[in-house]
Image (cartoon, grey):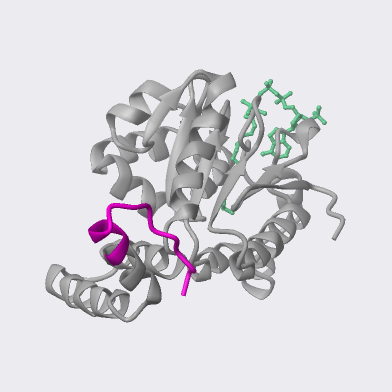
């Protein structure tokens, strides 16, 4: 499949989606979000892929929603044809997604990074929610996920001013990102992590991802109950039999992802 706004690559069992609208700083236009989700669903269904990386390349992650598409659109337009429906698609992706962020991750760009399961930042990364300057709000999860990632005071400051951004080191300090790397090394670092994840049992990896994401939805005991069911399910996999056997036989496990 030929895409106009993204590049698709495979490195071993890792699928890579690179946002590719350099002239618009990877602004998330309708075509881009459609193509990105389309490819994400394909990777999710592909038994040869175990983890996904979403990046904007070495210069910019994404400068937000495509502001040019906002012109002439009103409330009813948004209600009738919700241009944010693509964000719901992320919920159904069972394989882990790592965002690799260099440069600006603003507005919908920051929100896209936060929809991913973890963020690796290049030293040039800048996270912010400038929507308020356009007279709108962070509407793709920013008022929810940013609070959970960095706490209320910082999230309020970022979203209410629109001008207070977080650079890579501060994002690390606040727990928004997993790690910070030199720009030319961040992709390699993320790929290393994604490769480790992709080498593990795919169904069990999905159980862990689902259990952790569930912790954001439900009270502790309900989350623990879900986790209990998840480990029972893990005990039903062939990979569990192989993993335990390999440990006892002092060798590396050979997972079949079954
Ligand atoms: C459309 C964009 C864009 C965007 C940049 N461009 N951001 N086009 N949508 N979000 C375009 C510019 O128009 C310009 O095109 C080209 O990219 C380069 O941008 P410059 O502004 O010249 O670059 P620079 O001076 O380096 O400034 C970078 C920047 C600035 C600080 C990131 O571009 C900026 O403030 N962008 C908007 C950021 C923003 O407000 N994001 C939130 C969007 S709302 P031309 O053709 O002129 O060369 C949002 C809502 C999310 O995300 C969900 C709710 C619906």
User: Would residue 78 be seen by someone viewing this image from the given angle?
Assistant: yes
**Left or right side of 55 for 255:** left
* 84 relative to 61, above or below: below
Q: In which quarter of the image is the N terminus?
A: bottom right
User: Would residue 167 be seen by someone viewing this image from the given angle?
Assistant: no
Q: Position of residue 177 (x, y in %)?
A: 38, 36
> For the point 53% across and 58% down, which residue is it?
50
Q: Position of residue 86 (x, y in %)?
A: 62, 64
Question: In the figure, residue 203 lies in which quadrant?
Answer: bottom left
* 221 relative to 59, above or below: below
> For the point 58% across and 26% down, which residue is it?
103
Q: Where is residue 94 in the image (x, y as percent from the top left)?
A: 48, 67
Q: Position of residue 56 (x, y in %)?
A: 65, 37
**Left or right side of 84 for 190:** left
* 60 relative to 91, above or below: above
Q: Which residue lies furthest to the front in this view?
A: 249
Question: In the figure, residue 169 lies in which quadrant?
Answer: top left
> For the point 46% across and 22% down, which residue is it?
181
First to last magenta residue range? 245-258
Q: Is residue 163 magenta?
A: no
**Magenta portion: prevailing SS class:** loop
> For the point 49% across and 54% down, which residue is it?
198
Q: Which of 256 and 116 is in front in this view?
A: 256
* 196 relative to 40, above or below: above
**Left or right side of 146 for 61:** right
Q: Nearer the viewer, residue 252 or 53?
A: 252
The number of discs equals 0
């Amino acid at each position: 499949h030929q895409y106009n706004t993204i590049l698709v690559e495979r490195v071993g069992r890792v699928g890579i989606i690179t946002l590719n609208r350099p002239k618009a700083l990877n602004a998330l236009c309708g075509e881009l979000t459609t193509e990105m989700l389309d490819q994400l669903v394909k990777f999710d269904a592909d038994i040869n892929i175990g983890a996904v990386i979403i990046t904007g390349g070495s210069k910019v992650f994404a400068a937000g929603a495509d502001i040019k598409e906002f012109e002439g659109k009103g409330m009813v337009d948004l209600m009738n044809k919700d241009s944010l429906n693509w964000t719901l698609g992320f919920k159904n992706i069972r394989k882990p997604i790592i965002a690799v962020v260099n440069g600006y991750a603003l507005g919908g760009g920051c929100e896209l990074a936060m929809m991913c399961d973890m963020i690796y930042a290049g030293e040039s990364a800048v996270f912010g929610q400038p929507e308020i300057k356009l007279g709108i709000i962070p509407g793709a999860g920013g008022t929810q996920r940013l609070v959970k990632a960095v706490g209320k005071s910082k999230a309020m400051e970022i979203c209410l001013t629109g001008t207070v951004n977080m650079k890579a080191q501060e994002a690390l300090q606040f727990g928004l990102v997993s790690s910070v790397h030199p720009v030319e090394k961040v992709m390699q670092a993320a790929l290393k992590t994604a490769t480790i994840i992709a080498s593990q049992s795919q169904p069990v990896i999905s159980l862990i991802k689902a259990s952790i994401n569930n912790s954001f939805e439900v009270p502790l005991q309900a989350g623990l109950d879900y986790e209990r069911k998840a480990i029972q399910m893990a005990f039903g996999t062939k990979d569990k039999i192989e993993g335990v056997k390999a440990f006892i036989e002092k060798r590396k496990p050979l997972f079949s992802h079954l």
